[in-house]
Image (cartoon, grey):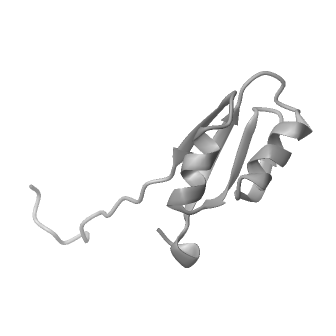
Amino acid sequence: MTKEGRRRVHVTLGGDPESARSVEDLAAAGLEVEERLDAIGVVTGWADDETLERLRSIDGVTVEAERGVQLPPPDAPVQ
């Protein structure tokens, strides 16, 4: 988690990707909408764990929380 205890979220909209209503539903559920990618039916934003559960209960959307990856330093031994 970053941004004040929230994590970045990617939401795929089902049906009509240009549906303004779906984006309104996401915002009403607590998603801080950052970007709308209407051409591919994806909305990105920020949400805490409680908001993630509300988002996942909305019909016709798939919600994925972004995960962080930690790479070892360049001089670390190969594992």
Q: In percent of the image, x 55 and y 48: which residue is there? A: 53
The answer to which image quadrant residue 57 occupies is top right
Q: Position of residue 71 (x, y in %)?
A: 29, 63
Q: In percent of the image, x 79 and y 45: which residue is there? A: 25
Q: Nearer the viewer, residue 58 or 62?
A: 58
* 55 relative to 5 in the view: left or right: right
Residue at the far top in the pictured view: 15
Residue at the far bottom in the pictured view: 4
Check the image and report above or below for 10 versus 51.
above
* 56 relative to 72 in the view: left or right: right
Which quadrant holds the C terminus?
bottom left
Check the image and report above or below for 15 versus 25.
above
Q: Position of residue 61 (x, y in %)?
A: 66, 33
* 61 relative to 75 in the view: left or right: right
Q: Nearer the viewer, residue 63 or 75?
A: 63
How many numbered discs, if any? 0
Residue 11 in view of the camera: yes
Q: In percent of the image, x 50 and y 53: which residue is there? A: 66
Residue 37 in view of the camera: no
Q: In percent of the image, x 70 and y 57: which residue is there? A: 31
Q: Nearer the viewer, residue 2 or 47?
A: 47
Check the image and report above or below for 1 versus 55.
below
Q: Nearer the viewer, residue 40 or 63?
A: 63
The answer to which image quadrant residue 56 occupies is top right
Q: Position of residue 32 (x, y in %)?
A: 73, 62
Check the image and report above or below for 23 versus 19.
below
